[in-house]
Image (spheres, rainbow, N blue to C red):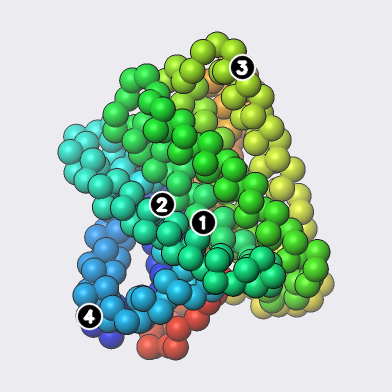
Amino acid sequence: MNGVTARNLPPSAFAPVMATGIVSQGLAAVGAPLLSDALLAVAVVLYGGLLAGLVWRVARYPREVAADLRDPARLFGFFTFVAGSDVLAVRLAPGPARAAAATLPVLAVPVAVLLLGCVASTAHRLGAGGMVRRADGVWFLCVVGIQSAVLAVAALAPGRARSAEALGWVAGVLLYAAVATVVAGRLARFGVRPRELSPPYWITMGACAISLLAGARLVHQGLGTPQLQAVIRVVLLTLWGWATCLLPPLLAAGIWRHLLHRVPLRYEPAWWTIVFPTGMYAVSTTALGETEGIHRLVLLGHLAVWVALGVWSLVAAGLVRTRWHRPPTANSRQKPSQEM
């Protein structure tokens, strides 16, 4: 990755790593090791190249990175680095690359803490009204970042769930509720134009699904007393129900955007934000079914994995076709909803 490309690297550049990593996890769970390993290799190569570009950009253009961290339209995109690192760590943890996997949360967790501090500073600067005016689906990435860290720690340090993991999970669930309230307020007060109802709104479902997965893994590790586990199980079923209920309106929004209002249906990097929630829904549904002993949920999760692979294939084909027919250019910086 050359300097010019690194300078224009969007904050949300790690979205394909998140998407590819979670689909690889799902394929491993359904017993498709060759496909899973192939996607894992793709995710590792992507991560290595993007990490080199990010380090170069931070070192070479610190003022531009600092400006991104102050811009609410770009700040939340940086959480894709956190989630991409952690999702990759979870996928690598069971294999021979466990030692390498352990280094990824060491990189990601401090960045997550820094980003959450930037989010708090931004919220204080903008106030409630300013936050509502600017909120969109990308903001749910902060929830994804927190819950991905919980999953990575649980995968790399298996055993009985620790209080830090439990607190992280609870914080993620509460943050999801807060972000959902702000985004709902924006939609109710200001509405949304067809072009603004972009693929990152799918992260609304993805953030819920990863919260479900993290909670299911903690229950599996014996978090809390039986009474507390019963309460958590109710929360998990509620999260699954909410994630499932979000699917019809998200699909309907795509029809409203592309068929009724004729927004062109062509590849854009933001399409990766549909792949990740689809894959996460599949993996979390399987995990919930296994935790609760509900065989039908396990079957539904396995079926959803193949749907996620199909979505991944379509988006990847769109990326290849775009790169093949149009040479890359040094475009001006865009909003995360356009560059993911």
Q: CA distance from mark 1 to mark 3?
A: 28 Å
Q: Mark 4 or 1 closer to N-term?
A: 4
Query: Are the residues flagged by discs 2 and 1 in contact, CB closer than 8 Å?
Result: yes
- Mark with earlier residue (3, 2): 2
- Which label lies toward us, 4 or 2? 4
Q: CA distance from mark 2 to mark 1?
A: 8 Å
Q: Neighbour class for label 1 at 10 Å: few (<14), some, many (≥20)?
A: many
Q: Which mark is residue 230?
A: 3
Q: Is residue 226 above or below residue 295?
A: above
The residue to which callout 2 is attached is 83
330 shown above or below 231: below
Residue on which disc 1 sits: 141
**x and y percent of residue 271 in the render?**
55, 64
Q: Amino acid at mark 1?
A: Leu
Q: Find the distance from the CA under tag 4 to the CA under tag 3.
A: 51 Å
What amino acid is found at the position of numbered circle 4 in the picture?
Answer: Arg
Which mark is first along the chain, 3 or 4?
4
Q: Earlier in the sequence, mark 4 or mark 2?
A: 4
Q: Nearer the viewer, mark 3 or mark 2?
A: 3
User: Residue 118 falls in which quadrant of the image?
Assistant: bottom left
Q: Could you tell me which residue is drawn at 43 percent across and 88 percent down?
A: 331
Query: Going from the N terminus, do you reach mark 2 or mark 1 first?
Result: 2
Position of residue 38 in the picture relative to residue 124 (left or right): left
Q: CA distance from mark 3 to mark 2?
A: 28 Å
Q: Nearer the viewer, residue 153 or 266?
A: 153
Q: What residue is at 66 percent from the left and 65 percent from the top?
A: 128
Say if mark 4 contacts mark 3, CB within 8 Å. no
Q: Which residue is mark 4?
A: 60
